[in-house]
Amino acid sequence: DAKTTQPTSMDCAEGRAANLPCNHSTISGNEYVYWYRQIHSQGPQYIIHGLKNNETNEMASLIITEDRKSSTLILPHATLRDTAVYYCIVRVGNNAGNMLTFGGGTRLMVKP
Amino acid sequence: DTGVSQDPRHKITKRGQNVTFRCDPISEHNRLYWYRQTLGQGPEFLTYFQNEAQLEKSRLLSDRFSAERPKGSFSTLEIQRTEQGDSAMYLCASTKSGGQETQYFGPGTRLLVL
C-alpha cells in the first residue's frame, strides 16, 4: 500500500472548518483513500473513504485531487469533540484481507 | 459504538503471566483483525481471520502470541509469558468480505505489564 504524508499537528477554532491535508503521491489506480480518527484512549473511528470522486457524509467531506496524489479531509464546523488524531490511509479496496497501515496521523486540536 | 466489543477494557498483569483478550465482531462480519498500538504510534497489524481460518500473521506476532477464532464468530488473543514490551492497546476490527471492506474497530484492550 502507498505511503502517506500528513502534518504532525494542526489547530482549528471551534465552529470553523478544519481542513486536513494528506499526500499520497505514489498511490496506485486501484487504491482507495481512507480516513479514520482516534479520540484519546478509544479505538479508531471510520470517517470516510473515496477512490476518485469527492465524497461527503454526515461526518466530513473528502476532496481528492484530479491526479489523486493528495487529498483533504474537511470537517465543516469543527467542535471540541473533533479533537483527535486523524489518519489518512491508502489501501487496495475489494482485496481479500487487506490490513490497514497507519502512519503517524495529524493531531487536530480544536480550540474554543 | 461500532458494534465491535472487546473484553476486558483494561488489564494489569505481572511479567511472566499469561493474558487472554476477547473480541466480538459485528455479527455479519466474517473478517476479523487484530492490531497493536503503543503510546504515540498508530496501530500496527498483527493478524487476521476469515471465518475461522487465520490467513495472515505479522512478524510482530511472536511465538508467545496466539490467536483463535474457533467458530468464526468471536476471537481470542493470548499472550504467554508477558513482557514489559507487550504493554500496549490491543485493537480488534471487523469487516464483511466483498465490497470495499471498511474495517470497524472496537474500543480496545489496554494492557499494562508490570
Image: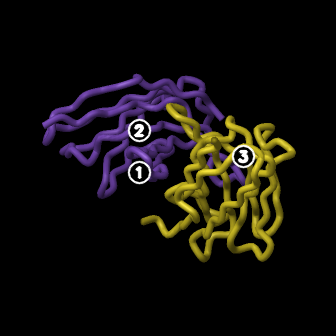
Q: Residue A86's mark?
A: 2
Q: Position of residue B92 (x, y in %)?
A: 61, 57
Of badges 2 and 1, the one in the foreground is: 2
- As drawn, the chain in yellow is B
- Colour of chain A in the rendered structure image: purple
Labels 3, 1: one chain: no
CA gap, disc 2 and disc 3: 21 Å
Q: Can residue A30 be seen?
A: no
Q: Secondary structure at mark 1?
A: strand
Which quadrant is the C terminus of chain A positioned in? Answer: top left
Q: Position of residue A7 (x, y in %)?
A: 40, 23
On the image, which quarter does residue B67 sit in? bottom right
Please give the chain letter of the residue carrying mark 1.
A
A39 with respect to A95 (left or right)? left
From the image, tell me which residue sits under label 3: B46
Labels 2, 1: one chain: yes
Q: Residue A47's mark?
A: 1
